[in-house]
Image: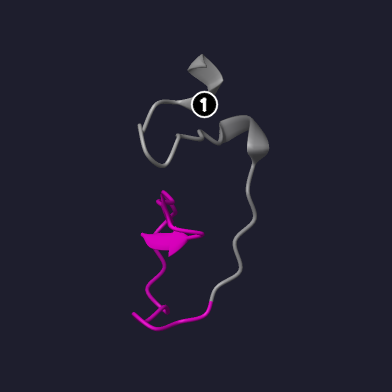
Amino acid sequence: YTEVGGCSLIAAVQSRSDLTFDSDIKLVFDMNKCHFFDCETEINIADL
């Protein structure tokens, strides 16, 4: 969980035992599996 530009970002990732709470990580997104929601209404943007 994090916040980007005032909006929440939640990522489902595989667990890794060598990471700590404050680890820096690189994220790569598969845009075919991403879902985007309006920050205020939380409605899926694809449904608009």
Of residues 29 and 5, the one drawn nearer to the viewer in this rendering: 5
Q: Which residue is mark 1?
A: 45
Q: Is residue 46 left or right of residue 11?
A: right
Vertical side of 45 occupied by 39: above or below: below
User: How many marks on residues?
Assistant: 1
Q: Quadrant of residue 3?
A: bottom left
Q: Secondary structure at mark 1?
A: helix
Residue 42 in the image, given as x and y percentages of width and height:
36, 33
Residue 11 in the image, given as x and y percentages of width and height:
44, 51
Q: Is residue 26 left or right of residue 19?
A: right
Q: Which residues are magenta?
A: 1-24
Residue 43 in the image, given as x and y percentages of width and height:
39, 26
Q: Quadrant of residue 23?
A: bottom left
At x 37% / y 39%, what residue is drawn?
Answer: 40
At x 57% / y 33%, what residue is drawn?
Answer: 33
Q: Is residue 22 magenta?
A: yes
Which color scheme is applied? one colour
Vertical side of 37 occupied by 18: above or below: below
Of residues 17 and 28, the one drawn nearer to the viewer in this rendering: 28
* Label 1 CA crowd tier, 10 Å (few <14, some 14–19, many 20+): few
Indicate the amino acid at tag 1: Ile
